[in-house]
Structures are given as structure tokens and as C-alpha cells.
Amino acid sequence: MASERTFSLQVIADHLEAELQGDPSYLISGIATLQQATSRDLSFLANPTYKKYLPDSQAGAILLAPDEADDFEGNALVLNNPYLGYAKISHWFSVQAQPAGYIHPSAVIANTAKIASSASIGANAVVEADVIIGENVAVGAGVVIGQASEIGADSYLAANVTVCHGVLVGERVTIHSGAVIGADGFGFAHYNNEWHKIAQLGGVIIGNDAEIGANTTIDRGALDNTVIGCGVKLDNLIQIAHNVVIGDNTAVAGCVGISGSTKVGKNCTIAGGSGLAGHLTIADNVHITAMALVTKSIREPGSYSSGAGSSMPTAEWKKLVVRYRQLDKLAKRIKTLEQQLSAGA
Amino acid sequence: MASERTFSLQVIADHLEAELQGDPSYLISGIATLQQATSRDLSFLANPTYKKYLPDSQAGAILLAPDEADDFEGNALVLNNPYLGYAKISHWFSVQAQPAGYIHPSAVIANTAKIASSASIGANAVVEADVIIGENVAVGAGVVIGQASEIGADSYLAANVTVCHGVLVGERVTIHSGAVIGADGFGFAHYNNEWHKIAQLGGVIIGNDAEIGANTTIDRGALDNTVIGCGVKLDNLIQIAHNVVIGDNTAVAGCVGISGSTKVGKNCTIAGGSGLAGHLTIADNVHITAMALVTKSIREPGSYSSGAGSSMPTAEWKKLVVRYRQLDKLAKRIKTLEQQLSAGA
Amino acid sequence: MASERTFSLQVIADHLEAELQGDPSYLISGIATLQQATSRDLSFLANPTYKKYLPDSQAGAILLAPDEADDFEGNALVLNNPYLGYAKISHWFSVQAQPAGYIHPSAVIANTAKIASSASIGANAVVEADVIIGENVAVGAGVVIGQASEIGADSYLAANVTVCHGVLVGERVTIHSGAVIGADGFGFAHYNNEWHKIAQLGGVIIGNDAEIGANTTIDRGALDNTVIGCGVKLDNLIQIAHNVVIGDNTAVAGCVGISGSTKVGKNCTIAGGSGLAGHLTIADNVHITAMALVTKSIREPGSYSSGAGSSMPTAEWKKLVVRYRQLDKLAKRIKTLEQQLSAGA
């Protein structure tokens, strides 16, 4: 899906503020890994593991750190952080989703919605009453934006996203397909063996530069808002419950669940499949490893884990599970041994 | 997102059958926590943890239990269960999603569908052949309701819900955005290293007063139906496999998976991230804690758990994981010690 | 939801290449379990557990293995694999979703899309520029197919599926509602405490005969493609990250997450709720049990597990969790005991 757009090395070097080694007029029309690149592609070396592929790479030019560039004879763009350079230039080769300023005639847009002239709205999208959509926003096909929600400038809502009523989305936010922002939080009063629904009257606020993955759900608050900080990155199939607050630039991997009213700090990372209980406070700069269960607040930065470790052959594992169930008895037997030995001594 | 509707304390007290302490004509136009409430808001004290916020709360009136009300000098509505009172009155401040009896002209509705005159159908929704939609049902934008499905009176399907064919939804059911009801169960016959699909001929039945969370999936049965009981509450991103039966008033938190043909009793709670194997029977009044794995039937009411507990610093945890893998050997070493000591005694 | 179609036993026997015992002209109009079947239904005995229901079954005819058929006096279709026979014949009783060759007038189809004459497109579906749709494809209501994607012959996309741009779907593929194929992978360069997005320029390739469950997400590759092999079966709410490769005929149960660039072999099974870290290699014929965490490559076929086993009463479990946290100390105490005993001996 690389586009047909073509750029000279000089233009790319200027954009990345990289030092150009080689032919400034050389033309690049795609990006690829060292192994897959052809002479028309730009590539990069960011991870030392892949250095072995450098000598034989067919890439037309390569983003390299200074110490790798000295011995390299091909075209190179030399910069301190080749991976960051790759991130920045990658967008030049991305397919543009929708033309700016075009509202598809099949979209249903309420009279009271205010849509910036440079925004685009896809086919069969629905924009309800009092919605405000900023400049250069791209709304994909089949998206529904509920009453009185606001989408900040330069944001992108992919096809079939649902933004419920009263949700505030910041600028330069990306929301991927199937994500649901602002569904009711899971709030009920339990009485007489029945669950009495509590109307969820808060909203959702998503900060600038956030990214929300496919089929991720962010519930609206019960009374106050659910808040996703600026620069937060949420992967796919994540559940963010009502009144959760996530600090700026925290990244959360797929299949994580964060329960109601938990506050996660800034610059945290939460690995895939983890679960956080409700009403916790997680400090800034906390890192949680894969499939961890967090039921207590974490007050200090650092890495945290739970569980019984990685997989092993099932036959071995079954023995451990049996022993795990005996663990309290085993500990008591150790105690008894110690007492016997102590008494015998 | 609180509406602009305003109610006198007297009207609220009458609705909740609460004793009014203070000014009956005092006007309330919202609900908020004790800390956030302004003089126009109603608040409530349900959890003793928040009692510290009572003296300084700016709330216009507060829902209080009798023993809290005695010393309180502001406007109060006194009732035995303030949290239940909050649940009941919260709906008065909720935004109404759609006008009753309005079918958006962009909705596509089969000729053979029967839609009650008070039901509303949102923009770009699709209602297929032989669907029956009851009184006061609200169908959101972009919803698809498949052939011959039925939606009971007073139910609400939020935007972009998918109800497949032959699904029976009860009365007063809420289904949140992105939920998929009645996709094929995961059924295949394995033969010659290939998976031969089994047509999923059963349906899904959802009882009255159930609530289904955003992006939750409930598969149709293989031959018989998948059944969600009355008053069941399912949070977001839950997977309910084919032929599962969930008893009345059971509540399931986010990211839970329940495998095929498992029967969960009434009045159970299943905490977030748990997984239930297939073909199990779970008794009534069973409570399963977060991220538990259940591979055997549970015949007695009570609380059940699995796993290795909550998170800890990763460095500490790594030591435990190493020891866990040694557990069978450690147990044998204890046995050896016991034998040595016994022989030596 | 069984259709009203009716077939004689002879016709069914011929299709399954089964030996007919009983009345060839007997008419069958549905399939049901031994317990639920009426005289108009076909049933089957595949699992010995259900043999007890055979004598009293009211089924009009039963699929039986040869050794069960000898003593059976009713109508029987005798074949070596009754479960496979049930799988094959089940499709005769399934409701047909859409008429072939019909494009609903509300569907929005780009001029440059090429749609085979026998394909059908549902109401309010959106087919973007340069899409290619093969013969007999059925696209459900509300589906969005992004630019330049291709859907192979005889595939079925259920309502509200999202296929992003540049996705190649093979033949006879089924994608269930809410699934999102080709959203951006979760790729960022971390620099100065911010996450810099990497454009995801790869695509997704889905092999022939694959099935993708409801609300499952398969991300597009960063540079190369994400690849789902032929005959792969993915259940609901699964996350497949960018550049994952899944080998032919592997089956993955619900709520599994597979992290970026991991390669899963052929003929594997991954049970519900499991999580695989990124950049792993999993051999062919590997079976991973429920809720397992896999953080290392698996080079040998076989069954693999992790975790602390199934649930138990919470009170018991709490003791084990306390002991688990003491495990390193317990192991050291065993060591000390051994040293003491050895010194004393």
C-alpha cells in the first residue's frame, strides 16, 4: 500500500535534518525493512539485531546512526535516532484516507452541527445535533457522532467508530474502527437481588494527540468525566471503565482492562492483557508487565508484575499446579521441620 | 451532560419516598459528588469513606441515611438507601437520546418489518425482513437488526449495535454500541487437519431488563439457544460463547470470556478478566474474583479465585517465578528432609 | 431459526455418503440434539457421554457410527464420523443471508470498485475506490470496505464489519460482525517522553477458508503484511497485532492477544484468554491452554500452559497467595534445613 509518491534524498534529508551521504537527487518511493527493500526504497537500521542485514540490503538509501554510517558505502541519511527518523518520514508514504473538505452526500448531518469547511465526512456517517467538528478532521464511513460531542482539529475517526453524546475529543487524535467512546459506565445499585441502573451523566474527555485502537471502549463517567490524557496511546480491545483518568503519554497495549475510577499516572506503560482493579492510584512512570493483575495502588515508579510466569510443557505445569495448591501445607511442613531440628539441636 | 431540567426537592422526595428536611421548593438541576456539587446540584452520601466531604459540600441538597441526617443542617432527603435513591433519581438528569415515534428517513426498513408506532429508528439504521420492534424502542444510528429478530418494548439499542438474525431481545433491555448479538458460535468438526464449519442454527434469547456492554459479543447457539437471563448485566468487551446460559440478575465485568455451553447460575458476579471453560455448571450466588480461571464446575455458592495474586516489583516477582518452576522439586526436598529427620529420630 | 426446507433421508444419505438404515423417503426439516429432537429432526451421536439419550430420543433419524448402529432400531444414517456428517449437513438448514447478485440501493459504491455480478451488497454498506469483490460474495449491511481492498469469491462479510484499505481477503472467508481488519498497528518511536507514530504501511492478507470472529481485530503491518493463513479460525474479541503470521489451519479461541511480529505455526490451537508476547516463533502443532502467558518461543510441538491453575474458594486461595509471596524465602529455608541436617549428620 505504499503510495506512488516519490521524493529525492535531499528533500528527505532536509525534513529529517539528517546528514546526506551519497546522491542528493536519488529518488525514493517507499520504505521497507533492510531485507525487503528494493533500490526504490528507503530503509533504516535501528535495532542492532538487524545489523547483519545491512551489507546485503538492496535499499536505495538507509537511515543510519553516525557510528554505523562511517563504514557504509551506499546512500545514507545520518541522524542520531534512525528509528525516530523512520517514524517521521513514514507518513510521507501513507495513503491519504479522504479528500479534505468533502462531505459525502449519504452522510446524515444534523442542522445544528457545526462542521469546519476543511473537514471531511465519509459515506453513511451520522453527525447528530450540536456536534462541533474542527478543521481538517476526517470522519470515516459509517461513523456515528452523538449529540453535542466535539472533535478537535486534525483528528481522524476511522470507519465505523462510535462517539456517543457529550464526548470531547482533542486535536490530532486518531480513533480506529469499531472503537466506542462514551458508552454508559457499568454502574448499578444492588438492592433486593436486582441491579438498579445509575444513569451515567458524566462524559469523556480525550486529550490532544491521543490514539485509540480498534474496538477499544472508553465509558463515560457516572458524574464526573472519564479522562484520557494528551499523547496517550491505547491499543485495540482495551476497556476503560467510567471515571478512569489516564495521565499524559501513557501507553496501554491490547486487551487491557482498567476498572472504574482508577487513576493511572503519566508516562506509564501497561503491557497486554493486564487488569487493574477499581479506585486505584498508579504513580507516574510505572510499567506493568504482560497479563499482570493489579489490585493495590502503586505509589512508586518502576516495573511491576504478577502471575506465575511464562508457559512450559503442560505435563510439567500440571505438577506445579498440584504443588501450588499444597503451598500452605508445604510451608507448615517447613516450619515443623525447623522446630524439630531446633528442638533436636 | 446534565440536562437543563429542574425539579423541586418536594417532587424528588415524593418520587423517592424520602423524608424532606429543609426547603420543599428548593430547585435542583443536576447531580454531583459531594466534592463537585454546586448549590444547584443534588448529592448523596452512600459510602462512609466520603463522609469527610459532607460538612463542606456545596450541594443544594443531599440524599442521606437517617443516622447521618440528624446532625445535618442543610437540605436533605432522608431515606434508608441513599445509593439506591441516587440510582433512581439519576435518570431524571439524563439526556434523552431520540424522540419517540420518529423513523429517520435514511433508515432502511424492510417491508415485512413490524415497528410499533412509538418506536424510533436512527439515521442509517437497517431493519431487515420480518423484524418485530416493540413500543418505545429506540434504535440508534447505524444499528443493524437481522432477519426475524425481535426487540421487546422499551428497549434501547445504541448506535452501531449489530443484532444478527433470529435473536429475541426482551423488554427494557439496553445494548450498547458495537455489541454483536447472534454472530455464529465457534463450532467446527476437526478432520484431516482441517476445521469443518458447523452451521450455527440456534439463536440468542436476552431476558427483560438485561444490559449488554459496548463491543460485547454474544454468539448464537449451535442447535439450541444461547440464553441471557432477566436482569443480567454484562459490561464491555465480554465474550459469551454459543449455548451459554446466564441466570437472572448475574453481573459480569469487562473482558470476561465464557466458553461454550457453560451454565452460570443466578445472582452471580464475575469480576473483570476472568475466563470460564466450556460445559461447566456454576451454581447460583457464586462470586468469581478478577482474572480467575475456572476450569471445573462450581457447585456451592461462595467466592472463588485463582492465580498468583496481585502485582509486585518485577525484580521480586522474577525470583518467585523461578521458585514456582522449582516447586515440585522443592516439595520433594521437603519430603526428603522429613524422611531423613524421621530416620534420624 | 431452522429453515422450512425439507429433505428425504435418501438425499441426505447420498450427500454424506452414509449407509441408510430405515425409510429412505422419511422427511427431515431440521437438526437437533438427541434430547431436543422431534420426529421431523435429524440428530447425531458423536460424544459417548450422550449415548444415554439415544434410546429415548424422538429424532426422526440419527447419524451414527457403525458400532452404535447395529442395535439401533430407528432410522439411522451410518458413517464413520457422525460429527463431521453433522457439520456437513448442518448448512442445509441454515438461513440464507442475502439474495445473490443484489446491490441494495442505499449502499454507497465507488465508481472504480469492481463488483462481480453474483455478489450482493447490503443496505448502507460502503465500498470505496478500487475495491474488488469476487463472485458470490455477500457483504452485509453497514459493512465498510476501504480503498483497494479485495474480497475473494464466496466470502461473507457480516453486518458492520470494517475492512480498512489495502486488505486482501481470500476465498470462502467468513468475517463476523464488528471485526476490524487492517486498522493501524500499534507502532510508535519513543522519544523525549512522547510517542511518535509510525505510519503503518503494510497490509493484511487473509487466506482462503479462514473465519474471523465478531469484534476481532487484525492490524495491518508496519512495513510488511500481517498474514492469516488458509483455514485459520479466529473466535471473537481476539487481537492480532501488526506483522503477526498465523499458519494454516490454526484455531484461536476468544479473548486471545497475539503481539506484534509473532509467528504462529500451522495446526496449532490457542485456548481462550491466552496472551503471546511479540517477536516469538511458535512451532507447528503447538497447543496452548487457557489463559496462558507465552513470553518465549516454542520450538517443539506439544501442549503448553502457564499460570497457577483453576479456581478454588477465595479463603483457601488467599493463603496460597501469601505463601507464593514467601516462596523465595521458603526455598532458602529448605536449603538451610538441608545444610543443617547435612552438618548434623
Image (tube, coloured by chain):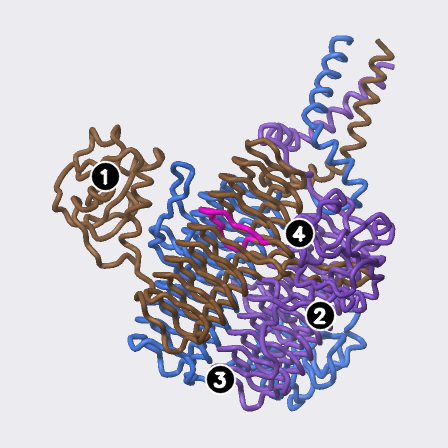
Chain colours: A purple, B blue, C brown
Identify the residue position indicated by label 4 in the image: A272
Callout 1: SS: loop
- Marks 2 and 1, how far apart in space? 61 Å
Q: Earlier in the sequence, mark 3 or mark 2?
A: 3
- Marks 3 and 1, how far apart in space? 54 Å
Identify the residue position indicated by label 3 in the image: A105
- B249 magenta-colored: no
How crowded pointer 3 is (Cα within 10 Å; few <14, some 14-19, many 20+) is rated as few
Looking at the rendered image, the disc whose residue lies closer to the viewer, 3 or 4, is 3
Does residue B270 appear left or right of residue C151 in this picture? right
Q: Position of residue A310 (x, y in %)?
A: 67, 38
- C231 magenta-colored: yes
Q: Quadrant of residue A316?
A: top right
Type of the residue with mark 4: Gly
Q: Position of residue C118 (x, y in %)?
A: 32, 65
Marks 4 & 2, CB-CB < 8 Å contact: no
To which chain does the residue with label 1 belong? C
Identify the residue position indicated by label 2 in the image: A227
What span is colored magenta in the figure?
Answer: C225-238
Q: Are labels 3 and 2 assigned to the same chain?
A: yes
Identify the residue position indicated by label 1 in the image: C17
Q: Nearer the viewer, residue A57 or B167?
A: A57
Q: Are labels 3 and 1 assigned to the same chain?
A: no
To which chain does the residue with label 4 belong? A
Type of the residue with mark 2: Val
Q: Earlier in the sequence, mark 4 or mark 2?
A: 2
Type of the residue with mark 3: Pro
Does residue C89 appear left or right of residue C126 in this picture? left
Looking at the rendered image, the disc whose residue lies closer to the viewer, 2 or 1, is 1
